[in-house]
């Protein structure tokens, strides 16, 4: 199994294609429903967008947390699932040809001397944009950190939430925790290079693809991989180097295990992330905006959807849609300072219908 | 209506009046019970409303369905009496229920 195929689980990032540098009008941070609808509203006023999301798919919380769950408060859609809403938005914004950059996180945002913004992602892609729209919802989906005493000290050196290079695990005592695709894929991928791979899971049932589970069982049967049913209790090491851990096994016993690399896969949680470092005013992890333009404290940076706050704010998808429409008007003023924007309806405007490709 | 007692890791107790038909998670959020995060809002998609059911109540709260069982893989220190309380519905039968909140949801 290659690093790339193993990385199909949504919490891994493996070697990516070469980094790129893109100049554009607008970068939208977050491909949730509000970020997607911002593409539509900006598109109507001739603004081209690049959309970036940390997940490997569009839809944000709608596709990550409740793809199958019904939403009942989208105007004119009495019932729609998170996935269906995402799919419909993708269809609606198709005419505007936004480009998507998934499975990456904007780590840096700096204003350039010419007033534009330089955004850099964690995998090295960079963007130069006149306007930035933060539609990051509840923040970045990031891997959950198991509440084990002292784990922070080992992170980056011996505790990893993703695999960048398989070779980094050569000759290590690797312990992988979890029962989903990420845990199983990496068990299979690291077994050939590691000194030993031990898979730890709380029960002897796995959510991962049956084929991977079979392969794992075969490796356990031929004693190439150890499988322990139980949970990690304590970590011990020197400095940043993890040396061993103790397991509390399902049968009630405890076991000590040599471990120089730990890979815990407990799913994702939302964290504000690097947004906090961009010099914007923040109040209780939300970005205060005005209700005319949804502008932040930094001219040219807007915040829409769940991540913003203003008097009376409701965290509803429909509020985010409204915010996107008003934001787009102001973004137009910034990007086309000399053009007058005339308000038009999609129902009657030939001009808008042309942009939508229906005329 | 059911009275539900939440016991925090430090021993602090809080008893809430929970309306029938709500999930225990919803009742906990309405009453600001600390440590019930419910990040996904009740979609059984995040495992941050993890609680330990008091032994005496394990039978009455029912069994975990497969979706909840799978989602518990994303919780920490899962025990036999672990439940995601967005998957437990309040009813008169749960009057007096005792739940323990874990040290940390994550």
Image (cartoon, rainbow, N blue to C red):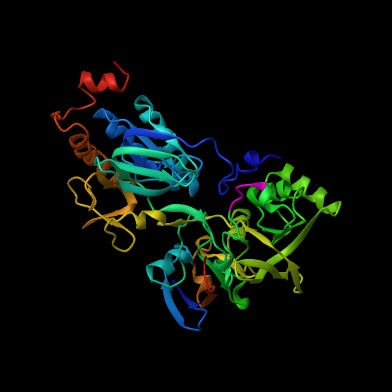
Q: Nearer the viewer, residue B18 or A235?
A: A235
**Is residue A76 visible from the viewing direction of this image?**
no
| Region in magenta | A162-166
- Compare residues A161 and A260 and report the one nearer the observer: A260
Image position, residue A317 (x, y; %): 34, 46
Q: Residue at x 19, y 39 (%)?
A: A330
Picture quadrant where residue A88 is located: top left
Judged from this view, the residue extending furthest toward the top is A359
Q: Quadrant of the C terminus of chain A?
A: top left
Give me the residue at 81% from left, 50% from top: A219
Q: Nearer the viewer, residue A273 or B32?
A: A273
Tell me if I can see residue A94 in this picture: yes
Whole-percent x and y of residue A306?
A: 33, 52
Residue A48 placement (x, y as % from top left): 32, 30
Taking A233 as reference, is B21 left or right? Answer: left
Residue A80 lies within the magenta run: no
Above or below residue A261? Residue B11 is below
In the rendered image, which quarter is residue A204 located in?
Answer: bottom right
Residue A30 percent across, percent down from the top left: 39, 44
In the image, is A15 to the left or to the right of A194? left
């Amino acid at each position: 199994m290659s690093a790339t195929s193993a990385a199909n689980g949504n919490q891994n990032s493996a070697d990516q294609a070469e980094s790129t540098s893109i100049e554009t009008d607008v970068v939208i941070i977050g491909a949730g429903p509000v970020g997607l609808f911002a593409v539509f509203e900006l598109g109507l006023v001739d603004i081209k967008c690049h959309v970036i999301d940390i997940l490997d798919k569009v839809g944000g919380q709608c596709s990550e947390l409740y793809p199958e769950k019904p939403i009942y408060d989208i105007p004119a859609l009495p019932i729609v699932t998170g996935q269906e809403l995402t799919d419909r938005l993708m269809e609606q914004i198709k005419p505007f040809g936004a480009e998507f950059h998934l499975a990456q996180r904007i780590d840096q945002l700096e204003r350039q001397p010419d007033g534009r913004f330089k955004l850099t992602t964690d995998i090295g892609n960079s963007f130069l944009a006149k306007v930035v729209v933060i539609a990051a919802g509840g923040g970045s989906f990031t891997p959950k950190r198991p509440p084990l005493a002292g784990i922070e000290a080992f992170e980056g050196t011996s505790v990893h939430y993703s695999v960048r290079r398989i070779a980094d695990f050569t000759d290590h005592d690797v312990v992988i925790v979890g029962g989903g695709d990420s845990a199983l894929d990496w068990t299979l991928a690291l077994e050939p290079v590691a000194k030993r791979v031990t898979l730890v899971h709380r029960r002897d049932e796995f959510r991962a693809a049956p084929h991977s589970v079979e392969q794992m069982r075969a490796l356990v049967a031929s004693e190439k991989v150890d499988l322990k049913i139980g949970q990690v209790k304590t970590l011990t090491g020197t400095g940043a180097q993890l040396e061993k851990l103790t397991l509390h096994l399902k049968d009630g016993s405890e076991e000590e295990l040599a471990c120089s690399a730990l890979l815990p896969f407990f799913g994702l949680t939302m964290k504000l992330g690097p947004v906090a470092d961009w010099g914007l005013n923040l109040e209780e992890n939300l970005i205060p905006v005005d209700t005319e333009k949804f502008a932040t404290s930094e001219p040219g940076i807007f915040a829409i959807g769940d991540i913003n706050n203003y008097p009376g704010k409701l965290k509803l998808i429909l509020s985010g849609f409204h915010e996107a429409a008003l934001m787009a008007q102001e973004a137009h003023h910034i990007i086309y300072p000399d053009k007058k924007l005339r308000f038009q309806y999609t129902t009657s405007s030939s001009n808008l219908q042309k942009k939508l490709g229906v005329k | 209506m059911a009275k539900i007692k939440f016991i925090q890791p430090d021993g602090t107790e809080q008893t809430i009046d929970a309306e029938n038909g709500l999930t225990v998670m919803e009742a906990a959020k309405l009453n600001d019970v600390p440590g019930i995060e419910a990040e996904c809002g009740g979609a059984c998609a995040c495992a941050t409303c993890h609680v330990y059911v008091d032994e005496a109540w394990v039978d009455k709260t029912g069994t975990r369905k497969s979706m909840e069982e799978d989602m518990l893989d994303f919780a920490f220190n899962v025990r036999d009496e672990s439940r995601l309380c967005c998957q437990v519905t309040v009813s008169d039968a749960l009057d007096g229920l005792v739940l323990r909140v874990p040290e940390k949801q994550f």
